[in-house]
């Protein structure tokens, strides 16, 4: 669950790089002319850090604080977009107007249950640490601008990643739909709905439970469980971003507020790690600050 926070928090920089900033969203007459130059023309970089309150592992009902870095930008015409504990590159430049497409490589690091100290449930912790998964793949997307006002957009994106580090050794596919709109010259909102599909190798690694465990008293051993792939979760995130200068086109400091909910599905919900020791309902909130230059 903690890795969903990275993805949602990364929407901050995405809001900053849109035309939101040039004008108020509430204008019913012809808006003022866009600034001739903004911090997002050409190369730029947005960096930030957030503090999130989220589940200690996917399926846990214990919550903890996590510190999350955020990086996004555009260098040499290549867009850098944040992903859960990783990033995706976009090699297709956006047009000045009309539908925009994105495509490029993807890199993510999945450390779910990879550190005993991060697992607050002693019985789940007794089943041991998992290896860190390094997922490499591709990201494809399309963005439709100007749906309800001149500055909003609806984006569709699909990420696919394969573990190359010998941890779960499987693959994930993550489709998402995001609606973005400015609320004022300095504030924007983004609402996203996403789901995650995992293969049998991924599900077996994170959600299967062996029938015995010598590290636990017999009364505490969880029932054996063999997990299979399928849809792992569906979720919704709401993000608010506010530029402290009052105009996002000039860069500088921005504040982020974020909340989200996801529902675990299939064997991710049925595993004893979730159904007995945790919960299929997963929540998170996060606050962060970013700087664009």
Image (cartoon, rainbow, N blue to C red):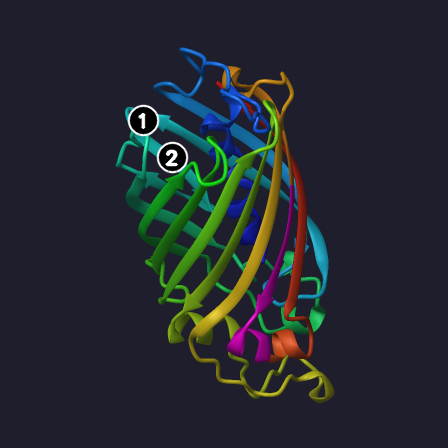
In this rendering, the answer to whether 274 lies above or below 246 is below
Q: Circle 1 sits on which residue?
A: 96
Q: Residue 136, position in %: x, y?
A: 33, 53
In this rendering, the answer to whether 151 lies above or below 209 is above
Q: Residue 31, position in %: x, y?
A: 50, 19
Residue drawn at x 66%, y 43% is: 286
In this rendering, the answer to whether 11 lies above or below 252 is below
Residue drawn at x 53%, y 37% is: 181
| Residue numbers of the magenta segment | 258-270
The answer to which of 65 and 210 lies nearer the viewer is: 65
Horizontal side of 10 relative to 183 (left or right) equals: left
The answer to which of 3 and 8 lies nearer the viewer is: 8
Furthest toward the top, the residue is: 36
Mark 2 element type: strand
Q: Circle 2 sits on which residue?
A: 80
Furthest toward the left, the residue is: 92
Q: Is residue 285 magenta?
A: no
Q: Residue 170, position in %: x, y?
A: 36, 67
Horizontal side of 236 relative to 228 (left or right) equals: right
Sequence-wise, the earlier of marks 1 and 2 is 2
């Amino acid at each position: 669950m903690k890795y969903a926070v990275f993805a949602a928090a990364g929407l901050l920089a995405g809001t900053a790089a849109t035309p939101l900033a040039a004008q108020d969203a509430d204008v019913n007459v012809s808006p003022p002319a866009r600034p001739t130059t903004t911090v997002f023309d050409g190369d730029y970089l947005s960096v930030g850090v957030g503090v999130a309150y989220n589940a200690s592992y996917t399926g846990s009902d214990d919550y903890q604080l996590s510190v999350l870095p955020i990086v996004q930008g555009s260098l040499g015409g290549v867009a850098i977009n944040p992903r859960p504990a990783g990033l995706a590159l976009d090699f297709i430049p956006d047009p000045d107007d009309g539908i925009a497409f994105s495509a490029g490589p993807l890199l993510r690091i999945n450390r779910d249950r990879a550190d005993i100290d991060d697992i607050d449930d002693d019985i789940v912790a007794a089943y041991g640490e998992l290896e860190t998964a390094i997922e490499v793949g591709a990201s494809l997307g399309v963005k439709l601008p100007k749906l309800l006002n001149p500055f909003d957009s609806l984006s569709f994106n699909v990420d696919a990643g394969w573990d190359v580090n010998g941890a779960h050794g499987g693959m994930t596919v993550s489709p998402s739909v995001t609606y973005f709109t400015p609320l004022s010259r300095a504030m924007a909102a983004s609402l996203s709905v996403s789901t995650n599909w995992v293969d049998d190798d991924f599900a077996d690694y994170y959600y299967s439970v062996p029938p015995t465990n010598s590290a636990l008293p017999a009364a505490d051993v969880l029932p054996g469980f063999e997990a299979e792939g399928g849809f792992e979760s569906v979720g919704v995130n709401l993000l608010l971003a506010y530029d402290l200068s009052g105009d996002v086109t000039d860069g500088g400091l921005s504040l982020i507020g974020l909340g989200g909910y996801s529902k675990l599905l299939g064997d991710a919900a049925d595993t004893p790690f979730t159904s007995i020791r945790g919960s299929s309902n997963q929540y998170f909130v996060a606050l962060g600050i970013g700087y664009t230059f």
